[in-house]
Image (tube, rainbow, N blue to C red):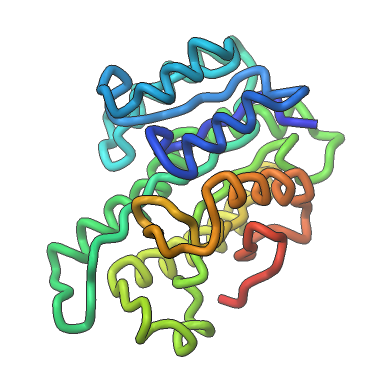
Amino acid sequence: MAPQSILITGCNRGIGLEIVRQLAEQTDPPKLIFATCRNPHSPENQKLNELATKHSSVVVIKLEATDGSSIREAAKEVERHLNGAGLNVLINNAGIMPPSTLESANAEDFLNVYNTNVVGPLQLTQAFQPLLKKAAEANKEKAMSWNKAAVINVSTLLGSIEKTPESFLYFPMLSYRCSKAALNMLTQCQSVGYKNDGILFTALHPGWVQTDLGGKDATLTVEQSVKGILKVLPNLSEKSIGILIDWEGNIIPW
C-alpha cells in the first residue's frame, strides 16, 4: 500500500520525474504526490505538468532546494494541501555532479556541490520535519515504515568510503563523492536524532542510471531504476534505519 502523501525534489527530469510517473500510475497511488522543481512554468517541466494534468494526485510545487526562503514557502504550500494531515515521505532526490578530480577540484566546486547535495537535504528535512512528525504521531501504532513517516536521501555507491578503491580511478567525481559521503553521515545523524519522532531515515543508491548525471553508458534505464526503488521502499523497516541501500535492496557499506 502506498503512503498517503509523498514529496519528491528534483522532479523536472530523470529519476525524480520517473518516480512521480510510476507512483501516479499505480493501481492504488498516494493521495498526494508533491513534485517539486525550480520553475513549474518553464518549458523544461512540460512532462511534469502533463502528469499533473492527467493525475489529480500530482501537485507541482515550486522549490529551489538551495534557497531557505523557497523551502519555507514550499513547506507552507504543502501544509495547505495536506489540510491538517502530516507528510508521510520526503525523498531528497535533487543533486548535482559536475566534473571534479584531485587536480581540478577547488573551493567553488566543493561549496557549490555541498550546498545542493548536503545543505539542501538538511534544510528540507528541517522544514518538513514537523509535518513528518505529525504523520508519525497519527500512526503511532504502526512500526517504522514509509507508510508512517520516512525520509529517503538519494545517495550513491560512489559515496561509500569502503568501496572507493574499486571505482575512483574510473569515476573520480571528487566533489560529488565527498558530498554524498557527507549525506550518508547526515542520514545516520538524522536517523538517531529523529528516531523518537517516529521518522525512518535511509540513504538510497538508485544504481548507475541513464540520466544527465549518469550518462548514456549507464547500466540502468530510469524506468528500471525507479521500478526497483518502488519495490524496495515499501519494505523499509526499523532494520533499514540509518543505512545505505541500493535499488535492489542490497546494503552498501559506508
- Residue 226 in the image, given as x and y percentages of width and height: 60, 46
Q: Is 99 left, or right, of 4 in this rendering?
A: left
In the rendered image, the vertical position of residue 112 relative to residue 165, given as above or below: above
Comparing 129 with 249, the one in front is: 249
Q: Is 99 left, or right, of 10 in this rendering?
A: left
Q: Residue at x 14, y 76 (%)?
A: 104
Comparing 43 with 144, the one in front is: 43
Q: Which residue is the extreme one toward the front?
A: 217
Q: Residue 48 occupies which quadrant of the picture? A: top left
Q: Residue 111 occupies which quadrant of the picture? A: bottom left
Q: Residue 62 occupies which quadrant of the picture? A: top left
Q: Residue at x 66, y 25 (%)?
A: 25
Quadrant holding the C terminus: bottom right
- Residue 194 in the image, given as x and y percentages of width and height: 60, 49
In the rendered image, the vertical position of residue 222 relative to residue 155, given as above or below: above
In the rendered image, the vertical position of residue 198 relative to residue 70, given as above or below: below
Q: Which residue is the extreme one toward the right?
A: 141
Q: Residue at x 41, y 29 (%)?
A: 36
Q: Residue at x 32, y 21 (%)?
A: 40
- Residue 98 in the image, given as x and y percentages of width and height: 24, 61
- Residue 37 in the image, given as x and y percentages of width and height: 36, 30
Quadrant holding the N terminus: top right
Labels in figure, total: 0
Q: Is 2 left, or right, of 214 in this rendering?
A: right
Q: Which residue is the extreme one toward the bottom?
A: 165
In the rendered image, the vertical position of residue 102 relative to residue 235, given as above or below: below
